[in-house]
Amino acid sequence: MSQAVLTTTTEEVLTTINPREALLLNLKGRTARIPDLKPVLAGWRGISSRHMSPFVEPLREKVNTRLRGFNFDKAKRRRLEASDFASFTALWWPDASLDKLEILAYLVIWLFTWDDEIDEPTGAFSTDFAGAQAYRERTLRFVGHCLGLNDTSSSSLSGHAKHEDDLRPQNEIVQSFDVIGSALRASYSRSQCQRFYDEMARFMAASEDEQAGRLTGHIPSLDEYWRFRLGTSAVYIGSAAGEYSISSRIPDALMRSDAAMQAIWDETNVIIAITNDLLSLRKEMQLDCIDSIVPLVFASTGDVQRAVSEAVGALRAARERFDNAAEDLMARRYEHDETRSQVEQFIEVQRSNCVGNLVWSLETLRYKMGELTSEDGSQTFIL
């Protein structure tokens, strides 16, 4: 019997599936090398010598107790424990008191577990857009309720009026924000609570945009990507918690309207988002996720290493813009010495967020990059 001849080419196969699947298939099997990223943040505290909160061990006990309180299956709980959110928190906010760190750790857990319900392929709402919309809507309303902003935070993703039932948490992840909101409400002014809420609303809206694109098979342009990525990174939420970590109240006008201060927030976000995109690339590809900077640059260049190099270049540029904004803020004369001191502390908190994120990303078992790190600080792996 004659043997059949297969004539279908790879290019023909790629045109018969949706663009996202085609991009994923084109990336699989290629090699990526991530260079040592620490030199990009050279001179910032925590790069040359580790800077972590001395409370990390008691914090770890609190984090593990918190995780055991959720009704997760054993496999998910083990994955979350392996992520080591205590180290994450102790590295991001190394100068915070233990009681502040506990709440910040709970916020970190909340953000990761909330997002996994939509972002991870195994999440409850990964492919259920309508369910995810309800999840986002009711989460946002519950957050506003916990922050004591019911009268002013009643806007939602759809603009629907708020009902009493909407303040009842949809699940245990949403419910777990209660202790976080209570702590922020006790420490923050109303304007600070509103600012935190506004960043949470931005996070929810960006989550909607990202999921809608993913489910329709759309590959975003880089401009489109950055429009939602700066929201889905949740870094703005971390920045909105920065004052809580140091018990400060920087004037609202400075935090909301000053161009240099906005640059501090924006560049912190860009630095952390790019760092995360690079160091989580291996994990994301294993989960068939392509919404990160390397796959999207590859889509237009066809070159993985060029995509990595462009991302690293953007990281360096963001660090330079951050330093310029910090220099601008610290060169000013402030009406009160306390304001100057709090601005300086806040800038250092943002730098710690960036450095801490890099260190944690290199070490966490969530990404498993430590096992790949060579003597020159780089990581090489197959997608």
Image (cartoon, rainbow, N blue to C red):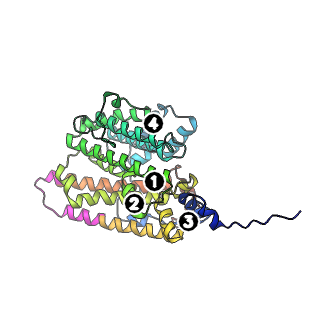
Give the residue type that dot 4 points to: Glu
Give the residue type that dot 3 points to: Ala
Give how far apart the Cα atoms at labels 2 and 1 are: 10 Å
- Give the SS element for disc 4: helix
Residue in the foreground of this view, choosing between 140 and 277? 140
Give the extent of the magenta segment. 322-339
Give yes or no for contact between labels 2 and 1 (Cβ–Cβ under 8 Å): yes
Residue corresponding to mark 3: 32
Give how far apart the Cα atoms at labels 3 and 2 are: 24 Å
Give the residue type that dot 1 points to: Gly
Residue in the foreground of this view, choosing between 324 and 17? 17
Which residue ends up furthest to the right in the rendered image? 1
Going from N to C along the chain, the mark reached first, 2 or 1, is 1
Q: Main secondary structure of the magenta part?
A: helix
Q: Position of residue 380 (x, y in %)?
A: 57, 64
Q: Which mark is residue 224?
A: 2
Give how far apart the Cα atoms at labels 4 and 1 are: 39 Å
Crowdedness of circle 2 by 10 Å Cα count: few (<14), some, many (20+)? few
Give how far apart the Cα atoms at labels 3 and 1 are: 25 Å
Give how far apart the Cα atoms at labels 4 and 2 are: 40 Å
Residue 189 visible at all: no
- Give the SS element for disc 1: helix
Q: Position of residue 146 (x, y in %)?
A: 30, 34
Q: Which mark is residue 213?
A: 1
Residue 10 image-quadrant placement: bottom right
Give how far apart the Cα atoms at labels 4 and 3 are: 36 Å
